[in-house]
Each structure stands twice: as C-alpha cells, then as structure tokens.
Amino acid sequence: MKSRALVTFISVIIAAILLTGACSAGFVAGRVFNPPEQFSALLPGEEISTPLAQGVGGTPQELEELFVPFWQAWDLVHDQYVDQPVDDEALMRGAITGMLDSLGDPHTSYLNPEQYQALSAQLQGNESYEGIGAWVDPTSDYLTIISPIPGSPAEKVGLRTGDKIIAIDGEDMTGIDGELVRQRVLGPAGSTVTLTILRIGRDPFDVQITRAEITIPSVDYRMLDNDIAYVRVLTFADNTKDLLREALKDLMSQNPHGMILDLRGNGGGLLVSAVDVASEFISDGVIVYEEYADGTRDTYDANKGGLATDIPLVVLINQGSASASEIVAGAIQDQGRGQLIGMPSFGKGSVQIPTVLRNQQGAVRITVARWLTPKERTIHGEGLTPDIEVPFTDEDFANERDPQLEKAVDTLSK
C-alpha cells in the first residue's frame, strides 16, 4: 500500500471529551507531518516549515485587495472598541476560527494550543484527565452525549448516548455554541456540576455529577460463559495494538470457540491503530479506501500475523461507534469475517489533516477525503447497518440488561 503519508489519525467530532483541557473536536485525521511509523505528535511548541502556497486564490495583488476589508476591520477594532487594549492573539485566533467555520464543515476547525496538546496526549493513550468523562458531539443543537467513558462519573450517573445537555447549573444552553458549553462542563476533580438532560421519551431532568480524574481506557477483555471470549476496544490510541495483542494472546490460550469484539461507544482514534486492530481479525485483503476529491485513492490492506483470524466472530456496534470503529466493523462485515450486532453506527467517514501552526498557535484540521469500506460503501453520513439489529431500551438500562451482548453470545453458541 502506497499512502500519501505514513500516518493518519481519525475520529468523529464526538470524540470531543469532557475532560479538563481536552480538545473540542476530539481525535482528528492527519497525515502531513511525515512522522515515523509510530505516531509522533507535533506539539504546539514545535514549528513546521511549509512553503507558502504560490498563486492560490489569485495574484499577490488580488490577494492584497481581497484582504483590504479585513485590515480595515482590524484597524477599526483597535481604534474604536470601547475596552482597550484589545488582545491581538485572540483576534487572530478568532479570525482563523471564523474562516474555517465559514466552510460549513463541522470537522474542519481550529484547535488552540491547549486543545491540540490534549489531543496529542489522548492519542498516545497514556494520559489521565479531570472531568465527567464522556465523548460528546458539540455540533448539534445542544451538546450531545455520544458515550460515557466506562467507570467515569458520567457513566455512574447514567448518562447515555443521545442525551442532550440543555442547561448547566440552571443556566439555559439554548443557542450557545457547543464548544462553549463543553468548556462550561469542564472542571477540577472533586467539584460538582448539575446538568439538565433532555432524553427522548422523558421530560428534562437534572443530574449532579462530581468530576474526577479519569484515565481513558483502551482495551478491556474477559472470558464469558459458554467458552466465548470478549474483548472491548474503547479507543484507537497509539498503544491499542499492543494492548489488544496481549488480550488476544491471553484469550486465545483459553481455547474459546467464539469471540465478541465490542466497539460500542468507540468514537475513533488513529487510522494506523484501526488497521492494526482489523488485521488481528482479518488475514488479508482491503481494510479501507481513502478517496479524494479528484477520485484518486489510497488503499490500506490487512497486516499479516493476526492472532484471531479464524475464530468465529461477532462485532457489537451502536450509535456511538464512529470513524475508526466503522472502518474496523465495515471491513469485518464486507470481508465476510463476522456479523455485526446492535444498532446502526454513527456515520463519520471523512478524513481530516491537522497541520501545526507556526509560533505555537495550535493547529488547523482540514477535511480532505472520505473513507470507503472494502466493498466501496460510503461510511460518511450513512453509517453501518448491523446484520442483526438489537435495540437497547431504557428498561434494559434500568434493569442492567445488555440484550446486544446476550444476542452476540447466543449467536456464537449455536
């Protein structure tokens, strides 16, 4: 496979994490730094030296004329704004944010230095944070919970996929930018926040959450009854490959006759990790295509040496399974390697490149391509339809039942 760059990392906007300092857009896609095979993030303090594009958008004279109104507005703010002096750095960052927002793509955006540094740490899989612990979507009408992190305060109070945060500490969040709402939810461990939740089928209700230090897990596993192995991948981080192989070695040594791969609530991560994970279950063939505006493609094939390429397999997905999760699940489904059970996935299959900005000013991420499954199905806006659809109801949640897992066990036990 010849790729346009060595590493891509991906995810849905939902991977914005409600943790102190976490980035507002979560795990993003990037492939411009030409790093080594293992992910090596450029932190905001490191500069890149990329030649400026020549002739893009017009001649130098045309560009100069184009930006006359911008500099006019800049001067007016400095001359007339009531609270002086103004913060030039904040104005510059706001200009970048506005430029990218004007494209109308929620996945193309600006990451300030703190957000980008937190993103880099998350993708390395070795950081803990303070907050309520949930992946969210800040692009909807209200900040929306995609999935609570296992063991987090958000999970303990019962927050669920699809919950909308409509008020914080009694203050209405209607019409407030999702990123600003997310920042309001942040706070140090031990502090409390009251969230008003809108959930389908219920009147709005309040939950009080005590924030905590949260370590984002990557892989969890155990043996179930009927000699069925269970492994859950919660994010696609830099260390997921090694953790998954350790789990599979342990599980396979116990001679299971079937395996469940749980990708529910997994909002994504590194592309290289997604390919590595899929390769543990698929012996050969295409994992995913990356298609660009001009119709050209990069092809990512399975790596050799997977540990669970022959065992009967079922994959669990839900509305919180996105991006890298959809790549893995889509490859397993298209290659006929196993059945998908659960609910339709999120449908995030666009590719973003993050580029570190000069002078320690964070990064911008730009959507450049879309993902296709091995059978050339579009992921973005479509999602994956499970082979066996099993809902997860309020009653199931209240009674601590997991009908999706039960169906997976039943399918493998036949």
Image: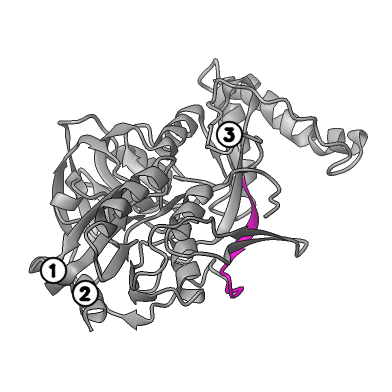
Q: Is residue 208 above or below residue 113?
A: below
Visible residue check, residue 181: no
Q: Identify the residue under disc 2.
A: 409
- Earlier-in-chain disc, 2 versus 1: 1
Q: Is residue 261 above or below residue 177?
A: below
Q: Is residue 135 left or right of residue 256?
A: right
Badge 1 amino acid: Asp
Identify which residue, 60 or 354, lies in the foreground.
Answer: 354
Q: Identify the residue under disc 3.
A: 363
SS at circle 3: strand
Badge 3 amino acid: Ala
Asked if the residues shown at circle 2 and circle 3 are in contact, with their CB atoms under 8 angstroms apart, the answer is: no
Q: Is residue 61 left or right of residue 371?
A: right
SS at circle 2: helix
Q: Which residues are magenta?
A: 366-377
Quadrant in which the C terminus appears: bottom left
Q: Identify the residue under disc 1.
A: 225
Visible residue check, residue 93: yes
Q: Is residue 116 magenta?
A: no
Q: Marks 1/3: CA distance?
A: 47 Å
Percent coordinates x, y for residue 257 in the rendering? 26, 71
Asked if the residues shown at circle 2 and circle 1 are in contact, with their CB atoms under 8 angstroms apart, the answer is: yes
Asked if the residues shown at circle 1 and circle 3 are in contact, with their CB atoms under 8 angstroms apart, the answer is: no
Please report the residue visible at 62 percent of the width from the left and 26 percent of the height from the top: 77
- Mark 2 or mark 1: which is in front? 1
Q: Quadrant of residue 166?
A: bottom left
- Earlier-in-chain disc, 2 versus 3: 3
Identify which residue, 138 or 63, lies in the foreground.
Answer: 138
